[in-house]
Amino acid sequence: MKRLKYLAVVACAALAAGCEHMFDEYNSDPNNTEMWQIHPESMMEQLLFSAADELMYGTWQLNGELMQYTVNLQSENIHRYIIRDSYANTPWNYLSKWAANADHMRRLAILKEEPNCQAIALTMRALMVSNQTDLFGSIPFSEAYKGRDTVAITQPRYDTQQEVYTRLLQDLELANSLYDVKKPLQTPTKDLIYGGDVSKWRKFTNSLHLRLLMRLSNRDQEMNVTQRIQKIVNDPTAYPVFTSNADNAILTFTNISPNVNRFGKYTEKSFSSNTRVMAEYIIRLMDGLGDPRLVIYARQQNNEWKGLPSGYPTTETINDGSATLNKEVLGDYTSPSTYMRYDEVLFILAEATYRGMLRGGEIEAQKYYEQAILASIDFWDSVNPSSVRVTQAQKDQYIQKTTYNNTLEQIMTQKYIAQFWCGYEAWADYRRTGYPVLIIGTATDNNGILPTRLMYPSRAQQTNSVHYEEAVREMGGDNMRIPVWWSQKATSK
């Protein structure tokens, strides 16, 4: 039997905010645990927790600042497009780390003949890898995760984004075919997302497949996006996707160690009021529409809704009346972290119909659009600990206020509101479509261009310089103005 050493999965302590969670499964020297001595389900708990933790931290630190959900009040200048090496290093390290662990789970599942575990591992690897390539561009993939193989590859080549996405779509197709919904997981408590419900995992796999296909909407000709989307949507029996909020891929923290939201230990000041406040763009947008989610996302100061302009000059006096993040909803010990939700699937279907990828025209696109908004409102209402609920009258009024006008801008602007606190999705959609139309601050760096990607961290350059340099030559440089392959800027040249 080929002896594959299990790559250690307990180095959570290095996470940016100092997570010290340890999972008992690996406390006895995991570096020396032989791969075949554990069941693949043993890897699920920490994999799911850590992936959710990374995406949640990324939306707080990076995505929120770039996409004008929040503005930092301290020395961090992400909203001014000054992004330190450490801010690129964190997602690079941890997305690749948990992709590697998902890959080990996949190989172990093949070894143990556990197809459901293999499908889940493929799905989680696709989630991590897609985020990494979306952030940076070309990344190690086809030769990655093989540092401890018999024939080790310690300096893997960088695959182009087209190569990465081609493989990811194949992986998700395979994962869908592997699921056996009649065979439950042996230890459902290890599944922090669905509690062992394989049928819901299958829906997540296919919903993620739709996300990645829509990410390639500008590359339809090369990647056959329209036909692939039609194949999934037109055959819900073979390709089930999310059909309600009950299917959402969400990790709900329990506040039972180690399954604790990292922001729970933050004070109100360190989470928001002394570090970052709500941006002017999102506050004006939601307040102007009378959006019932605004009081769930944010806390009003001085009885009025204000936000701080993104990229404001350092010489200006900070507006301390700006709204803050609602820590009770977002940063409690049990506040959830999102992989993907039902409303995103509906927005994808609305966009696909608008683009003519799906049948139905304006009437069907409007139906998906309105259902997406309502699904988002219902989700956020459900996680709001306040006793005040969103009423049906408020929902009806909001739908009337945002009546569908058959434009991509309207679909994407409403999707932007819904994608608050959801990993790096809003930034990806902005680079793909150009929406929403953001106001770039006067004190921004990067030639006043909202970053199109992150620069590779210095550690990646130092440890794999030959392949790093090859990737940079292929992409045309390593700066935050080089467009990623699937973006609107790259395809409109």
Image: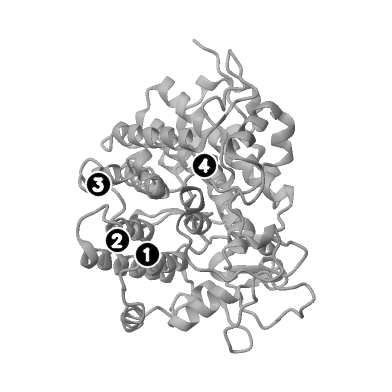
Report which residue position mark 4 lands on: 128
C-alpha separation, residue under disc 4 versus residue under disc 3: 25 Å
Q: Give coordinates of residue 225: x percent, y percent.
A: 33, 44
Residue 278 vertical position relative to residue 166 in the rendered view, above or below: below
Left/right of residue 491 with respect to residue 172 in the rendered view: right
As shown in the figure, which amino acid type bears the numbered disc 3? Gln
Residue that lies at the very extreme toward the top in this rendered image: 1
Real-space CA distance between mark 1 and mark 4, rounded to the nearest whole angstrom: 28 Å
Q: Specify few, some or many for label 3: CA neighbours under 10 Å numbering under 14, 14-19, or 20 or more.
A: some
Question: CB under 8 Å between callouts 1 and 4?
Answer: no
**What is the quadrant of residue 245 in the picture?**
bottom left
First in sequence: mark 3 vs mark 2: 3
Residue matched to label 3:
230
Q: Residue at x 29, y 46 (%)?
A: 226
Q: Are marks 2 and 4 in contact (CB under 8 Å)?
A: no
Precedes in sequence: disc 4 or disc 3: 4
Residue 8 marker: none
Tell us which disc is closer to us: 2 or 4: 2
Q: Give the side of residue 288 with respect to residue 462, left or right.
A: left
Using the numbered discs, state the Cα–Cα distance from disc 2 to disc 1 in whole angstroms: 7 Å
Residue 101 visible (yes or no)? yes
Q: Nearer the viewer, residue 106 or 361?
A: 361
Amino acid beneath label 2: Tyr
Task: Return the residue at label 2.
Answer: 354
Snapshot quadrant of residue 221: top left
The residues tagged by marks 3 and 2 sit, at their Cα atoms, a distance apart of 14 Å
**Left-right relation of 450 to 119:** right
Return the mark for residue 408: 1
